[in-house]
Image (spheres, rainbow, N blue to C red):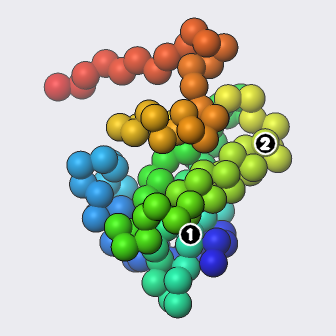
Amino acid sequence: MLRKATPEDIPGILALVKLHPDTLLPRTAEEYRELVGTTWVVDQAGQIVGCATLEVYSPKIAEIRSVAVHPDFQKNGLGAQLVNAAVAEGRKRNIREIMVVTSSPDYFRSLGFGACLNEKYALFLDGK
């Protein structure tokens, strides 16, 4: 069942994200407490098997992050449901640009993501 996350879901979310160390940045329980109002989970018989968060930076831009689905539940459309829930929240808030930083660009392209105005790209300075 797809639903908004609650504070009680945070340990399950942390455990799920931990299953994807090569593709997801680790987050703290405190970060999830701050973002629980814009985090969604898929709950399967009391187990958190999927999650996604919309982090709103300003009225103009937000980021979908920490999209994860337990390996045993992948390829069933749960990730798309989670992303769509986050996008719907962003649209409800009239956020103009919703971005995702990802190691799976083809997946997000299949969900409608692409370069902003076909020209903007997120670039990062390596902080080493």
Quarter placement of the N terminus: bottom right
- Residue placed furthest toward the top: 119
Say whether residue 48 is left or right of residue 86.
left
> On the image, which quarter does residue 27 sit in?
bottom left
Horizontally, is 91 left or right of 64 in the view?
right
Q: Secondary structure at mark 1?
A: strand
In the rendered image, the vertical position of residue 30 relative to residue 114, given as above or below = below
Task: Say which residue appears at 40% left-offset and 76% top-offset.
Answer: 11
Question: CA separation, marks 1 and 2?
Answer: 19 Å
Residue 57, visible in the rendered structure: no
The location of residue 116, given as percent across then percent down, is 62, 19
Q: Quadrant of the C terminus?
A: top left
Q: Which residue is mark 2?
A: 91
Q: Is residue 28 above or below residue 42?
A: above
Q: Is residue 104 above or below residue 21?
A: above
The amino acid beneath tag 1 is Val
Where residue 18 appears, as percent x and y from the top left, is 29, 64
| Residue 121 makes an appearance in the image | yes
Q: Which residue is mark 1?
A: 41
Q: Position of residue 20 (x, y in %)?
A: 29, 57
The kind of secondary structure element at disc 2 is: helix
- As drawn, the residue found furthest toward the front would be 75
Residue type, label 2 = Arg
